[in-house]
Image: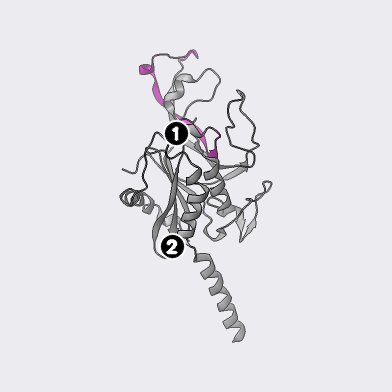
Amino acid sequence: MFIKILSISILLSIFLQASTYDLEDIKKDFYKKVVIHSNHKKSPNKFNLSESYFNKAKIHLLKEQDNFTYTQFVALVDLSQQVLVLTIWDNDEKDFFPIGFDYISSGDINREIETKTGEDHYVKTPAGLFDIKSGWRSDGKMNDENTTKPYGNKGRFVFFFGIQDSVRYNSFDKDGKKIKDKKKWILIKDKLSLAMHAHSLRETLGKPQSHGCIRMSEELNKFLDNNFVFFANLLDGEKWTHPYEPKPKNPKNYQLAGKYVLIIDSVF
């Protein structure tokens, strides 16, 4: 009987530990680690994470709630506002709670005009619910033009969400020549290796700019990394199981580890 009671007590303790979190503490940490260092005031967007906005956002999030079987972080990307809103899905309350937001930069298909033969095309960032497939840490190298670090500083995590269906403009004719008249372009289907990663050009955040991936600030990347927002599949309890990359430097909130990002074209 004693062993049975002890076993129940241990299981109850684990359950309570797994489902307990301090929402206000996480909000304060996000503000301290991300918002203070962000370019919110300089962004071309003047986004406000208001109660009315989040209530609209929850309509989209709640449509996916069957995928969330425990209390966890869930990220929402609103392409129309160029923001990532971090939330917590509370499986007991069956509700989402906002943590904060930061500006991102998604695919800009209109930049296809810049594409030359053999270069990567500009693809629309696809909408949908995506779960992380794998990832790796940036080597921190500059691009070929020596103008930016396209994956952020060394050690920033590249969150990879798999190869996804998308669309882009076809800006070349059948002979491979550039079609200069944009009115003659047509949308065609294409594939995108969808990733979310840091980018050293902070001024590009808050507007579409990328080839299709989602760019973010160094600070947001570190917060997502250290808080295991997308690392549920890389944890065995609190043990980091990535086959070759080191664990986050300042790990916390293991019990809230998630794996999902919901990308929508617009909340409204």
Residue 226: % across, % down: 58, 51
x and y percentages locating residue 146 in the rendered image: 61, 25
Asked if one can make out residue 69 in the rendered structure from this viewpoint, the answer is no
| Quarter of the figure that contains the C terminus | top left
Residue sitting nearer the eye, 42 or 239: 42
In the rendered view, does 47 fall on the left or right side of 149?
left
The residue positioned 55% from the left and 53% from the top of the image is 227
Residue of label 1: 166
Q: Are marks 1 and 2 in contact (CB under 8 Å)?
A: no
Q: Which mark is residue 91?
A: 2
Between residue 19 and residue 130, name the one nearer to us: 19
Pair 1/2: label in front? 2
Residue 260 position within the rendered picture, expressed as x and y whole percent measured from the top left: 48, 49
Where residue 185 sits, quadrant-wise, is top left
- The quarter in which the N terminus is drawn is bottom right
Q: Label 1 amino acid?
A: Ser
- The residue stretch that appears in magenta: 174-200
* Disc 1 crowd, CA 10 A, few/some/many (<14, 14-19, 20+): some
Q: CA distance from mark 1 to mark 2?
A: 32 Å
Q: Nearer the viewer, residue 212 or 192?
A: 212
Q: How is the image coloured?
A: one colour
Instruction: Give the left or right position of residue 42, taking residue 133 as reference.
Output: left
Q: Is residue 185 magenta?
A: yes
